[in-house]
Amino acid sequence: MQAFKGENATADDLEIRQGNKITPLEVWVTPIFDEKGNIAYAIAAFQDITDRKKAETERLKFTNELFELNQSFSRFVPRQFLQLLDKKSILDVKLGDQTQKEMSVLFSDIRDFTSLSEQLTTEENFKFINSYLSSMEPAIIENNGFIDKYIGDAIMALFSGSADDALKAGINMLQRLNQYNHNRSRVGYIPIKIGIGINTGSLMLGTVGGASRMDSTVISDTVNLASRLEELTKSYGVSLLISHYTFSHLKDANKYSLRVIDRLKVKGKSIAVSVYEVFDADLPEIREVKSATKTLFEQALLLYTLGAFSEAIKLFTTCLSQNPTDTVARIYQFRCQRKMRSLNRGIKH
């Protein structure tokens, strides 16, 4: 019909069917004009394109396999990692590639995992770890971060955007943990607890290894401090700690429920680091009473820092009367008592 309108036309979706055999065809149609310029007839040429269709099918299959392979690689080497190294593909990555970036680092770990895992079979351990990690992963992805590595039950995640992304991810992980524990309790499993530490600063991101095996990694004091903060959550009995470096990079710290709980020197460093507890993910009643006693607690902490232990212990005791579950206030109450006993012994001598 197109040819009889004076147009050249092509179609490659024709088939000849003979029993179970299907032969794909391509047809070209050309109008033929008489001496007066009128269409006299049309010529149609048919070609068997079986080989071409087969090649197209194989090419499509190959393309899909490459896509799936690339997706698989991205599970081992995150796409964001390649972007930070300014690489388009995993094929472009070489041993020793590196870049320096300012990022936020998040570490999380399950409390008492060793004793918990000893109660499970190997298969149950893998199922438990994978269900837990699968529950936590979206909190990081949805807040513009990516998981650098899993270290057993621990997670190390990186955030190249704002420090708020990392903090929101940490809060969301704890919120997701509440739902995860609810599901565990329904099938008779005990709830689990995790600790999260977040630090912000400059770090080196790149590849390390040898000729036959290399891995992506991050090296920096920033990373070490994030790991140290995660460990401190065990000592203080809290869920989420951030450094003053992360605190100072928050767009609006007043949006979060937090309080300063310590100032300490990290091993190998002479500069003290202020440590903040973030309790947005605590139960509503606990969050409310921590917010209500925040000023009182921080006044007590200042007195403790100044060596006024007698005055500090009174304020810590008042905090505990309003919130008996405040493990940090309990720790400082004990520290004040110990300091006062030590001072009294010194006076007697």
Image (cartoon, rainbow, N blue to C red):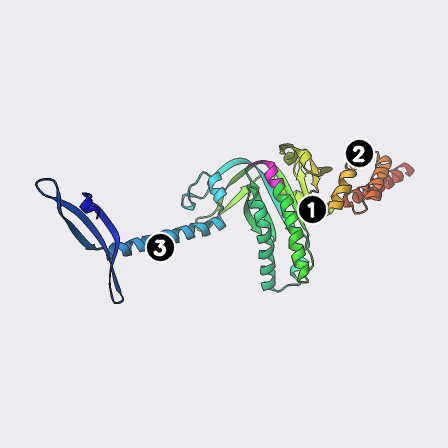
145 vs 69, left or right, is right
* Label placed on residue 61: 3
Q: Nearest to the eye among marks 2 and 3: give it.
A: 3
Outermost residue on the left side: it is 35
Where's residue 291, x and y in %? 75, 39
Whether 113 is drawn above or below 145: the answer is below
Badge 3 crowding class, 10 Å Cα cut-off, few under 14, some 14 to 19, many 20 or more, is: few
Instruction: Tell me which amino acid carries mark 2.
Output: Gln
> Which comes before the other along the chain, label 2 or label 1?
1
Which residue is located at x 63 percent, y 45 percent? 172
154 vs 308, left or right, is left
> Which comes before the other along the chain, label 2 or label 3?
3
Which part of the image, by quadrant, shows the C terminus? top right
Secondary element type, mark 2: helix
Residue 227 visible in the shown view: no
Q: Nearer the viewer, residue 131 or 218?
A: 131
Where's residue 136, x and y in %? 60, 50
220 vs 237, left or right, is left
* Label placed on residue 94: none
Q: Do callouts 1 and 3 mark residues in contact (Cβ within 8 Å)?
A: no
Outermost residue on the right side: it is 348
Where's residue 125, x and y in %? 61, 60
> Which comes before the other along the chain, label 1 or label 3?
3
Residue underneath mark 1: 239
- The image quadrant of residue 252 is top right
Secondary element type, mark 1: loop
Instruction: Tell me which amino acid carries mark 3.
Output: Lys
Q: Nearest to the eye among marks 1 and 3: give it.
A: 3
Residue underneath mark 2: 299
Q: Which contiguous range is marked in magenta?
A: 161-167
